[in-house]
Image (cartoon, rainbow, N blue to C red):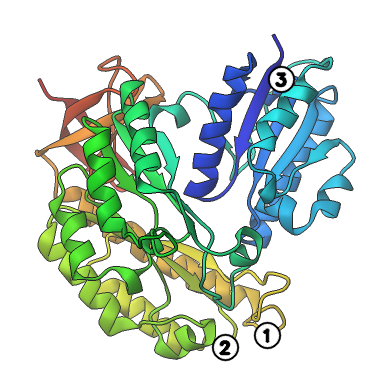
Amino acid sequence: MPSVAVRNFGCRANQAEAFAWVDELRGRGLAVGTDWGRSDVVLVHSCTLTSRADRDVRKLIRRVGRERPGAAVVVSGCYAERAPGELRALGNVAAVLPRSAGSRVAETVAGIAAGPGGAHPVRVPVRGEEAVGPSFRARAYLKVQDGCDNRCAFCVIPRLRGRSSSVPPGEAAASARGLAARGFREIVLAGIHLASYGRDLEPRRSLAGLLREVGEAASPARLRLSSLDPNLVDAGLAARLAGDGRVCPHFHLSLQHASERVLRAMGRAGGPPSYGHVLGELRRLAPDAALGADVIVGFPGETDSDFEELRAFVEASELTYVHVFPFSPRPGTPAWGRPRAAAAVVTARAEALRALSAAKDFRFRGRFAGRTLEAVVIGEAGGDVEVLTANGIRVAVPGPAAQRRESVRVRVGRVLPERTEGEVAA
């Protein structure tokens, strides 16, 4: 039986696309695994959000060429859409399928897999890649929205994925019902600009309405959301997010900055007052929720004062963690040619925010020591079973305590700076 390894880079939307391709590839009779060192075809689903994402994709492709020269590499995703020539130039790439290839990805991979493989098995991990294997399949990923109508000065993705488009709610609900019937107890709803869901549909729909329909169809599975634009989280959506017991209390917002001057330069609406209000409402309505955010440091023109505004906002806010991205200029975006701060300055700012994030995350997790939380089993690590609580805490419990995908209740025990331990409650 021909074998395929799928490697995913990037966002939850990419994860959802790769998740669907795995199903289709298996339906075509292919063995889909995690080890590209033993596979006939390696499908690399790429990201191009940053230059580092580009480098990580190229690094994996080159390693496959060195260590598994008999394997055919197929590259899909946003990098394949933006710069297909760069990828073809690597030499060991059998096909480059742009983002727009869609359903043709699995068909193309299946056709290539019909050829011979070869070479000796080797596995070399690469930072940034995600194996679409057992741990990935512990939770289901369902893409309900794609594209973006915003034109932020730093972002190349709208040009690659196009305008916002939504999956009709009935179709999304049917997909969720099928995933729950297969035994998934958590479904991650993914989108590029998820909070804009339904604005393109006729009649117009909303994310709050989608959550109601999909939540009912997916029972007993719970829903977890990908990133949300805080400018679109109004009172009604906040109440739905926090008050619906089928939605995991883990909300991640695309803030990007907290200096109004930098936000204007980014082409983004909102600012500290509105951001603070949204976070405060979510905390008031969902006291135990994890509240995260994406932030960019080193955007062109960012001063020490701008960065201090960002740092002070994160410190004083209800955020429990932040994902920090040093600014990465992307060809074709308005910010591409703007003067930037020195790399050492940007690195120092990123490290300072990451240290603050780690401290806030530690304090947040510490609040739950001795408490019992709802969770889902997502994998194994070093003899332990890893579970993910509804509010986003990864807890290591002695194994074997439960099966992957299973819903459990976990009692949180020792909370360490980089690890949370516990036990499955009876």
Tag 3: amino acid: Ser
Q: Which of marks 3 and 1 is nearer the N terminus?
A: 3
Mark 1 falls on what kind of element? loop
Badge 1 density bin: few <14, some 14–19, many ≥20, Cα 10 Å: few
Residue 302 point in image, percent of width and height: 52, 85
Instruction: Quote the CA–CA distance across marks 3 and 1.
Output: 43 Å
Answer left or right for 226 relative to 215. right
Mark 2 falls on what kind of element? loop
Extreme residue toward the top, this view: 1
- Give the number of marks: 3
For residue 24, the mark is: none
In the depicted structure, whether residue 134 falls above or below residue 102: above
Answer left or right for 346 relative to 275. right
For residue 39, the mark is: 3
> Which residue is under mark 1?
338
Q: Which of marks 2 and 3 is nearer the N terminus?
A: 3
Q: Which residue is at a point 45% across and 91% down the rendered structure image?
A: 261
State yes or no: discs 3 and 1 in contact (Cβ < 8 Å): no
Out of 259 and 161, give the one closest to the viewer: 161
In the depicted structure, whether residue 381 falls above or below residue 77: above
Tag 2: amino acid: Gly
Residue 229 point in image, percent of width and height: 38, 67
Tag 1: amino acid: Arg
Residue 236 point in image, percent of width and height: 19, 66
Instruction: Quote the CA–CA distance across marks 2 and 3.
Output: 47 Å
State yes or no: discs 1 and 2 in contact (Cβ < 8 Å): yes
Mark 3 falls on what kind of element? loop
> Which residue is under mark 2?
301
In this rendering, the label closer to the viewer, 2 or 3: 3
Q: Which residue is at a point 29% across and 76% down the rendered structure image?
A: 275
Residue 304 point in image, percent of width and height: 48, 87
